[in-house]
Amino acid sequence: MAANVQVCEIDPAVEEKIKKFRFRKEKNIAGIMLKIEKEGLKVVLDDEYEDTSIEELQEELPEHQPRYLLLSYVQKHDDGRVSYPLCFIFCSPLGSKPELMMMYAGSMKALVNTAGLTKVFEIRNAEEFTEEWLLEKLKLFH
């Protein structure tokens, strides 16, 4: 029962943005950063990144506040194939306010379900989020 609890609602504009992001045609790394607006208890758009890198996205993650990151990644395989996995990354830094952590943790499942994602990862600080880390996580899906 507790698994179905949704703490914050998802802004309809965010739902629309996610839908478009899932079906994007560009063949580059892109991301959508989402945050929770405490006043309205709503998941809203924080920022968008087009034709970016993992390093740039890592720098954008706040040190002491949780964030959700939807990532469209370009993965080059050893056999020459290229795939474009869509990943959901929940960054929950140590030192974040407990009430904020509860709101993010309690809203994550609904957001993942809304986005229809299967590659869901969590990091505890921005430094963990590297290309090597991501490639290691993506190996679990082969």
Image (cartoon, helix red, strand yellow):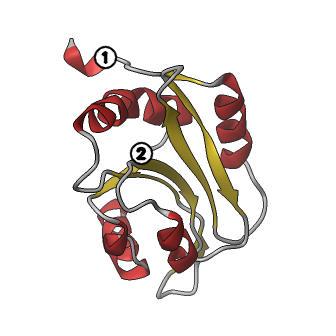
Q: Indicate which disc, 1 or 2, sits on the residue closer to the N terminus.
A: 1
Q: Residues within 10 Å of mark 1 (few under 14, many from 20)?
A: few
Mark 2 highlights which residue? 118
Residue at the image point whose x is 47% and y is 28% from the top: 38
Q: Is 109 in front, or is 42?
A: 42
Residue 102, numbered circle: none
Identify the image quadrant of residue 133. Answer: bottom left
Task: Give above or below for 99 relative to 45.
Answer: above
Residue at the image position 22 percent from the left and 56 percent from the top: 94
Task: Residue at 38%, 70% (x, y): give it.
Answer: 129
Which kind of residue does numbered mark 1 sit on? Answer: Asn
Q: Which residue is mark 1?
A: 4
Find residue 11 and report its horizontal and vertical position in percent: 62, 25
Q: Residue 50 location in percent, x, y? A: 73, 65
Question: Residue 29: image x %, image y %?
Answer: 64, 70
Whether residue 4 is visible here, answered yes or no, is yes
| Residue type (three-letter) at the residue carrying disc 2 | Thr
The C terminus appears in which quarter of the rendering? Answer: bottom left
Q: Nearer the viewer, mark 1 or mark 2?
A: 1
Q: Is residue 75 visible?
A: no
Q: CA distance from mark 1 to mark 2?
A: 17 Å
